Image (cartoon, helix red, strand yellow):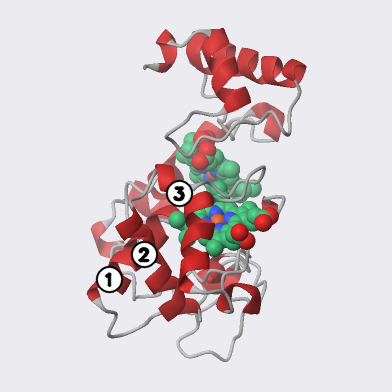
Amino acid sequence: MQPDEMSASSMFDVVKNGKIGTAMDGFSYLLNDQEITAVVKFVMSEFIEKKQTNTYYHIEENGWGGHERYAAAFPFALGEISLDTPWNLLTEEQSIGKRLFMSACVTCHDRAHVDKKEIKWRSRSVSYPRGKYSHKEDPVDAISGASPFSAHDRSPLISGLTKKESQGQKLFIENCAFCHGGDGKGANWIGSFLESRPRDLTSDGIKSVSDLVLLNMIRGGVPNTTMPAWKSVLTDEQIEALTAYIRRAFH
Ligand code: HEC
Ligand code: HEC
């Protein structure tokens, strides 16, 4: 069903009770009918009727009046021009934009598009160094080291994964890392905001359970939390591959 064909009452039903056969869980445990009605009303009016980009961030109310004056930096914020495009390939306007981006935007837009992942375009910190940033590292990881969260987004580098494990790795990155972090610890950006927090998959508690128990944890999810029941989304074979990867990568 297209969103604009959706009536307020069917949306109410999905938000309240979830949708069987998908990862959409019901919210009746968290929100009362009045609150669900308010959410549905907002979604209908904001996204379906007014078609507003209400998530637009750089607006007057957020302290970004006249954001258009930074237009030269937009292509870098939007990933249209790679940040590691050599200076000599940039027009004058684009060079101004890149300089502006590096000085005023990169602190928040710190995951700008790059062509060559392995090349760090600067060896000094471009934003305030936080977390475990170290000036002594060689080469200095000035980009991901600048955010305490993004370190957790990186998956461990493991060589010699079996076919099953690498299938699991791909599934993990696509479906689980968003909440549990690439390193499985749940200490990534999104994970830190979830209540309850995503389980630390490297913990002894998870390490000590049998494969079958782990498999069933993933199949069944955890009711009344954001942990979905994956049996509705992934096949048993895929969940087995995930289990194999979790064992190999985190245990
Ligand atoms: C304080 C954090 C912060 C800073 C600094 C910042 N941005 Fe953003 N920017 C955001 C957020 C948050 C969004 C919305 C992201 C989303 O919706 O996915 C955004 C979105 C954008 C977008 C997409 C359109 C939009 O508004 O949703 C553009 C273009 C953009 N920023 C350009 C810039 C430029 C150019 C600079 C530097 C002059 C900059 N930003 C600095 C946080 C920031
Ligand atoms: C939307 C966020 C989210 C996603 C996506 C997600 N999880 Fe979770 N997961 C959680 C949360 C939150 C918990 C902790 C729930 C609780 O309070 O016990 C959890 C718990 C778990 C547990 C422990 C379950 C238990 O019974 O104790 C395992 C194992 C797990 N997740 C594996 C996975 C795997 C594998 C995937 C990907 C297929 C995944 N998770 C995707 C949020 C998520």
Please name the residue that numbered disc 3 is placed on. 230
Query: Picture coordinates of residue 212 (x, y %)?
Result: 47, 67
Work out whether residue 62 or residue 216 is closer to the camera in this orientation and state it: 216
For marks 2 and 1, the one nearer the N-term is 1
Residue type, numbered disc 1: Lys
**Which numbered dot is residue 240?**
2
Residue type, numbered disc 3: Trp
> Can residue 10 be seen in the rendering of this structure?
yes
Q: Residues within 10 Å of mark 3 (few under 14, many from 20)?
A: many
The reply, left or right, for residue 85 in relation to residue 105 is left
Look at the numbered disc 2 and give the secondary structure of its residue.
helix
The reply, left or right, for residue 1 in relation to residue 133 is left
Q: Answer yes or no: do the residues labelled 3 and 1 have beta carbons within 8 Å?
A: no
Mark 2 to mark 1: distance in Å? 8 Å
Q: Is mark 3 within 8 Å of ligand 2?
A: yes
Query: Picture coordinates of residue 98 (x, y %)?
Result: 42, 55
Look at the numbered disc 1 and give the secondary structure of its residue.
helix
Compared with 211, 21 (above or below) is: above
> At 36% from the left edge and 82% from the top edge, which residue is drawn?
158
Work out whether residue 174 or residue 206 is closer to the camera in this orientation and state it: 206
Q: Answer yes or no: do the residues labelled 2 and 1 have beta carbons within 8 Å?
A: yes
> At 55% from the left edge and 51% from the top edge, which residue is drawn?
221
**Which numbered dot is residue 45?**
none
**Which numbered dot is residue 164?**
1
Q: Quadrant of the N terminus?
A: top left
Work out whether residue 77 or residue 243 is closer to the camera in this orientation and state it: 243
Q: Answer yes or no: do the residues labelled 2 and 3 have beta carbons within 8 Å?
A: no
Work out whether residue 84 or residue 173 is closer to the camera in this orientation and state it: 173
Mark 2 to mark 3: distance in Å? 12 Å
Look at the numbered disc 3 and give the secondary structure of its residue.
helix
